[in-house]
């Protein structure tokens, strides 16, 4: 089986590529910049393609039986149709746990379901890895995290666990027509997350609780993903980009159902998900 991985340089996609390669699968990874290896295993084929321009995927789809689909709503229908015409028989798409609890609608899921191909939706809760882009610059520069929500619990999931569920669905039968809600094994407060990062570093990391407005200013100043995601992460906007309802940013959305662990990950993998402390140890050098 040849498997095509789109979004292959992202947090989850990179892990999908690595885990498939470790399983001995014939993997082709797409990137807009194929001239670099991007840390992929040596025997992984790297193909140039851009999901924003679906026709660029045609060479990469040749001989492919299964597709890991990174969701780009604007071009999803064209990408899925090209995959179907190329002979792809199975699609596993990356979605979000917010869909499972009715807080978000992902049109990409509908496109995949309508394709007539085997499909599986992987719906992760918040990424632990987001903190690499939100907090790591602060930790590297000053050994401090300035952020609100000190003692509010959040269930976050290790990107390698999200990938492991996707890999199972790509390689094994029995996952067609399933939507897996992927969470971590427990919720962690911001204060506890910072403590876990400090423990992984073996150095003190100070936590300073700030208002949402101050955190927004700090993240916007960082630029990149932090600036782009600040309004959503801090509750100033909803998934559709509209302003969130109340003073705390969350009054119109009930996230409590995603604070508890869901059983899907353990049912698929036969083991619990990795904890935040494990994730922090895995990424200690990124914070150092």
Image (cartoon, helix red, strand yellow):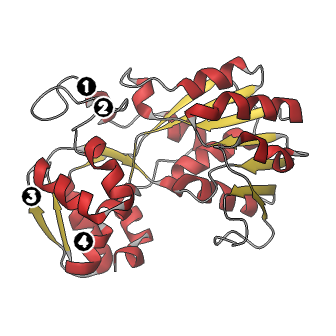
Q: Vertically, is 252 above or below 121?
A: above
Q: Earlier in the sequence, mark 4 or mark 3?
A: 4
Under circle 4, the secondary element is: helix
Toward the viewer: 261 or 80? 80
Q: Earlier in the sequence, mark 3 or mark 1?
A: 3
Q: Earlier in the sequence, mark 2 or mark 1?
A: 2
Distance from label 4 to label 2 (Cα)?
26 Å
From where the camera sits, is residue 174 visible? no
Toward the viewer: 205 or 232? 232
Toward the viewer: 14 or 47? 47
Closer mark to the observer between disc 4 and disc 3: 4
- Count residues near mark 3 (Cα–Cα under 10 Å), then give few for <14, some for 14-19, many for 20+: some
Q: Earlier in the sequence, mark 4 or mark 2?
A: 4
Location of residue 39 in the rendering, given as x and y in whole percent from the top left corner: 64, 72
Q: Earlier in the sequence, mark 2 or mark 3?
A: 3
Closer mark to the observer between disc 2 and disc 3: 2
Quarter of the image where the C terminus is located: bottom left
Residue displayed at 71% across by 55% down: 30
Location of residue 203 in the rendering, given as x and y in whole percent from the top left corner: 23, 82
Evaluate if marks 2 and 1 touch, with contact meaning CB atoms under 8 Å apart.
yes
Residue occupied by mark 1: 253
Residue occupied by mark 2: 238
Under circle 1, the secondary element is: loop
Under circle 3, the secondary element is: strand
Evaluate if marks 3 and 1 touch, with contact meaning CB atoms under 8 Å apart.
no
Evaluate if marks 2 and 3 touch, with contact meaning CB atoms under 8 Å apart.
no
Q: Earlier in the sequence, mark 4 or mark 1?
A: 4
Under circle 2, the secondary element is: loop
Evaluate if marks 4 and 2 touch, with contact meaning CB atoms under 8 Å apart.
no
Residue occupied by mark 3: 209
Distance from label 2 to label 1 (Cα)?
9 Å
């Amino acid at each position: 089986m040849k498997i095509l991985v789109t979004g292959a340089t992202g947090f989850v996609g990179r892990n999908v590529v690595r885990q498939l390669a470790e399983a001995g699968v014939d993997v082709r990874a797409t990137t807009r910049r194929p001239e670099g290896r991007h840390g992929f295993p040596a025997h992984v084929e790297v193909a140039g393609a851009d999901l924003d321009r679906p026709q660029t995927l045609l060479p990469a789809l040749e001989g492919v039986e299964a597709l890991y689909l990174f969701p780009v709503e604007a071009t999803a229908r064209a990408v899925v149709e090209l995959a179907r015409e190329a002979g792809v028989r199975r699609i596993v798409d990356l979605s979000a746990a917010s869909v499972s609890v009715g807080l978000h609608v992902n049109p990409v899921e509908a496109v995949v379901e309508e394709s007539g191909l085997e499909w599986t939706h992987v719906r992760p809760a918040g990424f632990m890895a987001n903190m690499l882009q939100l907090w790591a610059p602060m930790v590297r520069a000053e050994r401090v995290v300035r952020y609100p929500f000190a003692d509010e619990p959040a269930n976050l999931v290790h990107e390698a666990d999200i990938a492991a569920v996707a890999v199972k669905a790509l390689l094994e039968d029995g996952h067609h027509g399933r939507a897996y809600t992927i969470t971590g094994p427990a919720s962690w407060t911001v204060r506890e997350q910072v403590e876990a990062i400090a423990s992984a570093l073996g150095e003190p990391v100070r936590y300073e609780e700030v208002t949402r407005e101050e955190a927004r200013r700090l993240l916007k100043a960082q630029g990149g993903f932090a600036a782009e995601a600040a309004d959503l992460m801090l509750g100033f906007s909803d998934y559709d980009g509209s302003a969130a309802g109340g003073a705390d940013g969350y009054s119109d959305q009930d996230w409590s159902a995603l604070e508890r662990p869901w059983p899907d990950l353990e049912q698929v993998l036969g083991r619990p998900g990795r904890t935040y402390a494990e994730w922090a140890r895995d990424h200690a050098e990124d914070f150092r």
